[in-house]
Amino acid sequence: MTRVLGIIALVAAFGMISTGSLRADPVQAGDIVRFVDGPGSPGGEFGIEKVGQPGVLFTTFCLERSEYIDFNPAGFIVTGIDRNALNGGVGAGPEGDPISAQTAYLYTQFRQGTLAGYVSDATHANALQNAIWALEGDVVPSTLSGLAKDYYDIANSTTWTDIGDVRVMNLAWATSRSGFTAGTLAQSQLVMVPEPTTMALLGLALFGSIPGLRKRRKKV
């Protein structure tokens, strides 16, 4: 009975982690996704759907001010979920442009609904998008004002030194259109993933709690 209760507790903990601290978005390399326009222009908010599966999965913002997407139903191929924006941008190296801890902080706060004063309208979406572009080197910080400067300053006041659960969803055009050839890299977007360390620790805890597994391991 103790073991059963332990497993139930761990499963409940998994549920809290997966919907709370991890906030994983259900996309992976090879998926074809399309954009749904939201408040703000140019840039996010953007809703992300899987092609052929209506329903917005999550909301995102773009990373490269000089790259492009569209709202064509054919969508975009997810080429990878990475720490770097492969299209690069200002200061990008051969492996792409790594997102900053400050950008990750702002996007995490946005996704948690805890970004100070944020409401889903064009004014706030434009401000957040421009702050992200400034943090990624695509907008000159001294040109920011109002809410955009506030978000930029909030990001730079954080103690974050890593990007947490935030990654880059790198994309390619799924079909040739708008002057782009199919397979050409498109504008990279922000996405959330499970934090690997937490998942590994949870997996070990579940493994150790299942009756008989540890005993069988000893006999091998």
Image: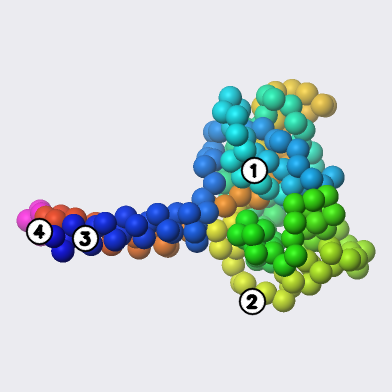
Q: Mark 1 = which residue?
A: 170
Name the N-terminal-most of marks 1 and 3: 3
Structural distance between the alpha carbons of marks 1 and 3: 42 Å
User: Against 88, is 32 above or below?
Assistant: above
Residue 146 within the magenta-colored segment of the rendering:
no
Q: Secondary structure under badge 1?
A: strand
Residue beneath the point at 79% across and 42% down = 67
User: Against 102, is 138 above or below?
Assistant: above
Residue beneath the point at 21% across and 60% down = 5
- Give the residue type at disc 2: Thr
Picture colour scheme: rainbow
| Number of other residues with Cα within 10 Å of mark 2, as a class: few under 14, some 14 to 19, many 20 or more | few
Circle on res. 215: 4
Structural distance between the alpha carbons of marks 4 and 3: 19 Å
Residue beneath the point at 79% across and 39% down = 68
Magenta-colored span = 214-220
User: Against 119, is 183 above or below?
Assistant: above
